[in-house]
Image (cartoon, helix red, strand yellow):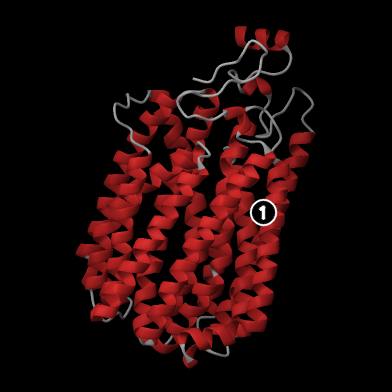
Amino acid sequence: MTTKSAAGEPATDETQGTDTSAKTGGKQLAASGSILGIAIILANAGNYLLNVFLGRWLTPAEFADANLMVTIMLLVTAIAVSLQLIAARFASINDANGDHAETAAMAAWLERRAMIAGLIVGLSLVVGAPMWRDFFRSESALPFVILGIGMPFYLVQAVGRGVLQGRMTFRPLAATFLVEMVVRVVAGVSLVALGLGVQGATLGLTLSFLATWLHVRILTSHRGAGALSASTVKSLITYAGPVGVLLLGQIIINNGDVLIAKRFLEPETAGVYAAVALVGRAVFFLSWSVATTLFPAAAQRDQAGEDSNGLLYSGLGIVALMGLGFVVGAKLLGGIVLGEVFGPEYGGVSNQLALYAFATSLFAMANLIVSHHLSMGRRRESFLLVGGGVMQTALLLLGRGSIDSLISAQVVAMALLLTVIAASHFFGLRTSSSESLAPSDSSGLRDEDHPTRTTNDPQLDEKRLAA
């Protein structure tokens, strides 16, 4: 456990080999976050390399089928990232308190539930494969079966990643993304080159899930984990609600357009749109490294009663710069690059790609604000995100006739969403600052609402704890 030396300075945690009090330091956080960011960039670069290969070797209709498998995986990400965020928040709080046994028990409890959820999702894909094939006008039902087999492994590994994230051990976490990418690219390219087509690309996905699960299991062994207390179970279940709401909003916004395009556009046109969406969504996935880094740091600062808005504003600046660079690059070179890389069918989409990247950048900034609030247990912004997803879906269905109308609908929806969520954030700050009855923390709750939290006034602490 973390102890204090005679001088009052925090000692090094012997179990984890880290100074838990230093984890939220700006320089260390920036350095660790940079490592994670570079790993995610490399992972995305590898995944895009795989998609370049698929775009060259598959017809647009086949590429749309392969991209559908990725989109379904991203839909299931709602469950995976929910598990990761739950594990990350509680691991970060336990780590700050030096209670590593509680983290192990929590992770083991979540992994059992993740396995059950993975089996349910997998069976729905395997058993319903013929139905999904007909609904999405796919050529074969086999890819749905292959993808379903990997779902339990995909969800269980998310818990381990959450523990790594919560402990702010970003280098091992970064390694898991690289392992996943390498296996996916090598297996996917090899199997497609052998003539397995969409089935081979999907098998590469499933093999990457298995490899990541094995790697994460080695990094986060929970042998001998004790039982979880009833109060902790209740806290996990309660927190799962707003996390699930956040991820539901993310999935609707990030993937609804691809599903609508696949359902209503002609197969060749849907393939072109899939390529635009694939590249345009890169802004969001790159921004996820920022959210992943800031999430546990904000949770620990909130637990200590410290302000964490500076972290949020720095993160928003980074995401805005990422988005600006991507939009400009897409406008100048997007169509040329897509035409050269994927083939002439994908050329001439610079304007569409730039607008798509702009919409995604707006969403990435809104998502970062929501994630920041969720790290401190605040729910309102998560529900606003789902509302934005519903609004976007309605606009997409109205403009489902062409690529341009689908992208325009997203620009309008995401501009409105970011405006509403930013307004909610600043309204929350004003409400919090207006509280004068008692000292307030960053979650907007008075100190007496946190009976276990201490302040800098020993007499006040003694009176509150005695009460």
Looking at the rendered structure, the secondary structure element under dot 1 is helix
Name the side, left or right, on which 22 lies relative to 135. Answer: right
| Residue that appears at 71% across and 42% down | 309
x, y percent for residue 248? 47, 55
| Residue that appears at 75% across and 38% down | 431
| Residue that appears at 52% across and 44% down | 170
Total tally of numbered discs in the picture: 1
Relative to residue 308, is residue 59 depicted above or below?
A: below
Front residue (pair 312, 53): 53
Q: Which of the image's four quarters has the C terminus?
A: top right
x, y percent for residue 131? 24, 72
Q: Which residue is mark 1?
A: 421
Is residue 402 something that shows in the picture? Answer: no
In the rendered structure, which amino acid carries the disc numbered 1? Ile
Crowd around label 1: few <14 · some 14–19 · many ≥20 (10 Å): many
Name the side, left or right, on which 19 lies relative to 111. Answer: right
Name the side, left or right, on which 307 lies relative to 136. Answer: right
Relative to residue 342, is residue 30 depicted above or below?
A: above
| Residue that appears at 45% across and 75% down | 260
Relative to residue 332, is residue 109 depicted above or below?
A: above
Q: Residue furthest left?
A: 127
The image quadrant that residue 464 belongs to is top right
Is residue 175 something that shows in the picture? Answer: yes
x, y percent for residue 115? 28, 45
Front residue (pair 243, 276): 276
Front residue (pair 297, 408): 297
Q: Residue furthest bottom?
A: 344
x, y percent for residue 141? 23, 74
